[in-house]
């Protein structure tokens, strides 16, 4: 599932390509035919990201809500000449937007619907603060964590507590902050929470800018700059189970947390002593 940085980046790039333009909209697959007909011919006035949700604003006051879910994908095309034929769609292309030389396909989303202000408010009210938004209030996440007995590893994936974090960043942020994923969320101290928030925010901002996930400090993989980090060495623990920790050499462990595989170094992340002895 794409993490929040992918969604914010898509919003930024699509805004640049489509904002202020009259857009032709249709649903090649047919499942969003009625909605696309409402948008067809309107001017796109803005795109806003909130966690993993996108909201497209249109000149007649409509709002399109998109959530990619596990399988949703955007594909953007640029046509040399607006008179050229449109690129082929697939059986899953729910929505096609065309403006001048830009063509955008949306396939396989979990949600692609028109929402009214009340529906949008209800959606956003269920989301925890998104560290990539200027209006993000970390106090809300801190208060939500204090009420939860679930482990911090599971809490980071719960979009009601904090929005935008997916599986890679939860593993990497817990490694970088030295926190064992099974610590109860409400046992975190305020300084620990502040470190988690700052780390997640920095990772998401970085991923939004770069369009990819790179969480290692170059020095930890023996290079000087981020651009020198080899493709296979961009993360500390994610999917590195059975391999030696990049910092201490201890074997990285994996187990299931909140239905997804989680990865951690028992030594760097201060696992309970019994577990460390067994590993
Ligand atoms: Zn380690």
Image (cartoon, grey):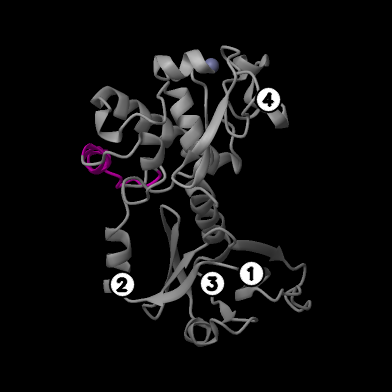
In the picture, residue 95 is in which quadrant? Answer: bottom right
Q: Find disc 2 in the rendering and name its residue.
A: 119
Residue sitting nearer the eye, 113 or 147: 147
State the CA–CA distance, disc 1 to disc 4: 32 Å
State the CA–CA distance, disc 4 to disc 2: 44 Å
Residue 119 visible (yes or no): yes
Which circle, 2 or 3, is nearer the viewer? 2
* Among the two numbered marks 2 and 3 on one chain, the one whose residue lies closer to the N terminus: 3
State the CA–CA distance, disc 3 to disc 4: 39 Å
Q: Find disc 3 in the rendering and name its residue.
A: 21
Under circle 2, the secondary element is helix
Q: Is residue 247 left or right of residue 230?
A: left
- Residue 174, position in %: x, y? 44, 29
* Among the two numbered marks 2 and 1 on one chain, the one whose residue lies closer to the N terminus: 1
Q: Is residue 152 magenta?
A: no
Q: Would the CB of label 4 be found within 8 Å of ligand 1?
A: no
Under circle 1, the secondary element is strand
Can you say which quadrant of the picture contains the C terminus? top right
Under circle 4, the secondary element is loop
């Amino acid at each position: 599932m794409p993490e929040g940085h992918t969604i914010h980046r898509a919003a930024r790039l699509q805004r640049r390509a489509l904002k202020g333009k009259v857009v032709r909209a249709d649903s090649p697959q047919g499942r969003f035919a009625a909605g696309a007909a409402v948008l067809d011919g309107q001017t796109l006035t803005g795109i806003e990201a909130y966690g993993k949700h996108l909201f497209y604003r249109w000149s007649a006051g409509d709002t399109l809500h998109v959530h990619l879910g596990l399988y949703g994908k955007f594909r953007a095309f640029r046509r040399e000449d607006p008179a050229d034929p449109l690129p082929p769609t697939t059986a899953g292309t729910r929505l096609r937007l065309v403006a001048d030389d830009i063509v955008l396909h949306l396939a396989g989303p979990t949600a692609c619907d028109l929402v009214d202000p009340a529906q949008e408010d209800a959606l956003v009210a269920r989301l925890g603060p998104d560290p990539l938004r200027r209006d993000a209030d970390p106090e809300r996440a801190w208060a939500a964590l204090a009420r939860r007995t679930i482990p911090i590893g599971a809490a980071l994936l719960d979009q009601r507590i904090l929005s935008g974090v997916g599986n890679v960043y939860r593993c990497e942020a817990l490694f970088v902050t030295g926190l064992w994923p099974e610590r109860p969320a409400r046992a975190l101290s305020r300084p620990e929470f502040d470190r988690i928030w700052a780390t997640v925010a920095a990772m998401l901002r970085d991923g939004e800018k770069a369009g990819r996930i790179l969480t290692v400090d170059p020095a930890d993989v023996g290079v000087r700059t981020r651009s020198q980090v080899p493709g296979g060495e961009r993360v500390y623990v994610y999917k590195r189970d059975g391999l030696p920790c990049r910092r201490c050499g201890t074997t990285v462990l994996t187990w299931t947390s909140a239905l997804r595989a989680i990865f951690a170094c028992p030594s760097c992340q201060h696992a309970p002593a019994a577990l460390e002895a067994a590993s």
